[in-house]
Amino acid sequence: MTRTILETDCVTPERRQRLFRFEPDVFSTDSLGLEWEPKTRFFHVFEAGELVANASFVARTVNVAGADLPVVGIGGVVCRPEARGRGHATAAIAAALAYGRAVTGADFGMLFCLARLLPFYSRSGWDRVPGPVLIEQPAGPIASPLEVMVKPLSRHAWLAGPVRVNGKPW
């Protein structure tokens, strides 16, 4: 298998179609009606020249138990169905985490996911954050309807206590 990862600050319309429109609701989140934070960096995975996966990055400072913590926000994680099970999404996430840590110095990665994806992320060292986690939406802060997970990027331990994302989910 020949895998390459392309780091970019945008997604072309063709790549967006291939990555995010191969089924009607690729992330299974349309019914939630959430507004999302735009991502600022994308990590496209190619296998044998074909675009097969992506993970995206956004820098954010969240408030945990009254303390402000920078986090490497990971979102837009997707792998085309025909390429699953070969580590492409994991490789994209690792590239996004490494980039985000270098840029922000954050001690944690953070992501939002559906409950059915908890086992996938848990296998890669992500831990579920007990709720509620407050996210911003146009009508004001709400408890995230998605699971929130963090991954330590250093020896620091995640703080216990309420979490406020200080913006929209990503």
Image: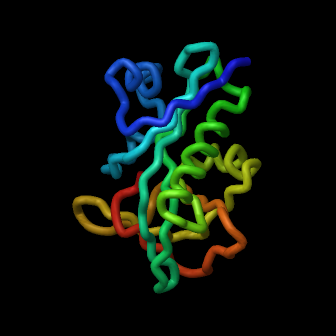
The residue sitting at 42% across, 53% down in the picture is: 58
Of residues 133 and 98, the one drawn nearer to the viewer in this rendering = 98
* Residue 165 visible in the snapshot: yes
Q: Residue furthest front?
A: 102
The residue sitting at 51% across, 83% down in the picture is: 65
Quarter of the picture holding the N terminus: top right
* Residue 28 visible in the snapshot: no
Of residues 32 and 170, the one drawn nearer to the viewer in this rendering = 170
Residue 83 x %, y %: 65, 21
Residue 72 x %, y %: 51, 58
Residue 38 x %, y %: 33, 47
Q: Residue furthest bottom?
A: 66
Of residues 133 and 83, the one drawn nearer to the viewer in this rendering = 83
The residue sitting at 55% across, 15% down in the picture is: 50
The residue sitting at 43% across, 72% down in the picture is: 164
Left or right of 22: which side holds 11? left
Give above or below for 151 relative to 132. Answer: above
Left or right of 43: which side holds 154? right
Residue 112 x %, y %: 51, 53
Give above or below for 9 relative to 145. Answer: above
